[in-house]
Image: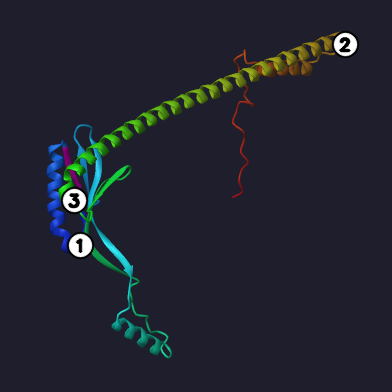
Amino acid sequence: MLNLSVTKDALDRALALADALIKALTKEGFAFEIDAEKGGTWVKWLETGTKMTVVITEHIKRSAHVITPAEERARKRYWDRSRWDHSASYPSIAQYDYTPTGTLTIEVGRWPSRKWNDTPRTQLERRLGEVVGGVMVLARDIHAKEQEEARRKEAYRIAVARYEFLTTRRASELARFKELEADATNWERAVRLRAFADAREKQLRAEGVLSADEADWLAWARTKADWLDPLVLVSDLILDAPEPKRPGYW
């Protein structure tokens, strides 16, 4: 059954109109689905699977409420009592009056959508052919819109994937380059340390003061140069060990 939003007096007519609309659209390749959880009705174009909401409503006229004599008396009682009783409640008086008109509307879709109303000269029952034709056009329009939206989403997905690939590749390349620069810098530092150790040893030998302590220092310096050199795979017992943690007081 279609989603109906009508008053009691218009219910029988709305039910008959809904039945006629369902039969007419079913002949044109549409089916109806009920969303019991959300209380809605969908019309589905079987050719493409396009779904549209459908509802029949009644126009309710809203007008400013005219206070009745009973409401006027209730309001007067409130004012009289509120002078000495501050707990008195103001009477509930409607701001507007709502009057059923019996004018029905068929609305299909949300965006885009189409509406067909009763007119002073023609009711919707006599315009079902126009309504069915309009629903078919709307279904095609929505299907085209959905296809375009799907195309745009796919293009966006591809663009995002391309962007992520390029940014990841660039970040990886930059990291590799920085590692290269660091290795080259460390290699130059290692070469400089070895050259310094060689110069120091040459000086000590020339002066005849190459002691055991100096020899140990030269070995230590060359070991550090090897540790710094990315082309020499050695580790340092002290510098490669985890950084000591300061003990807590307990």
> Residue 207: which numbered mark, if any?
2
Mark 3 surroundings within 10 Å by alpha-carbon count, few (fewer than 14), some (14 through 19), many (20 or more):
some
Q: Is residue 75 above or below residue 179?
A: below
In magenta segment, residue 33? yes
- Write the start and end of the magenta stretch as one range: 30-35
- Give the CA distance from mark 2 to mark 3: 117 Å
Is residue 1 visible in the rendered image? The answer is: no
In magenta segment, residue 237? no
Would you identify the image quadrant in which residue 186 lies?
top right
Is disc 3 placed on a helix, strand or loop? helix
Is disc 2 placed on a helix, strand or loop? helix
The residue type indicated by label 3 comes to Leu
Mark 1 surroundings within 10 Å by alpha-carbon count, few (fewer than 14), some (14 through 19), many (20 or more):
some
Would you identify the image quadrant in which residue 103 lies?
bottom left
Residue at the spot of label 3? 124
Residue at the spot of label 1? 7
Q: Nearer the viewer, residue 169 or 216?
A: 169
The residue type indicated by label 1 comes to Thr
The residue type indicated by label 2 comes to Glu
Mark nearer the N terminus (1 vs 3): 1
Residue depicted at 18% across the width and 44% down the height: 33
Label the magenta part by its dominant secondary structure: strand
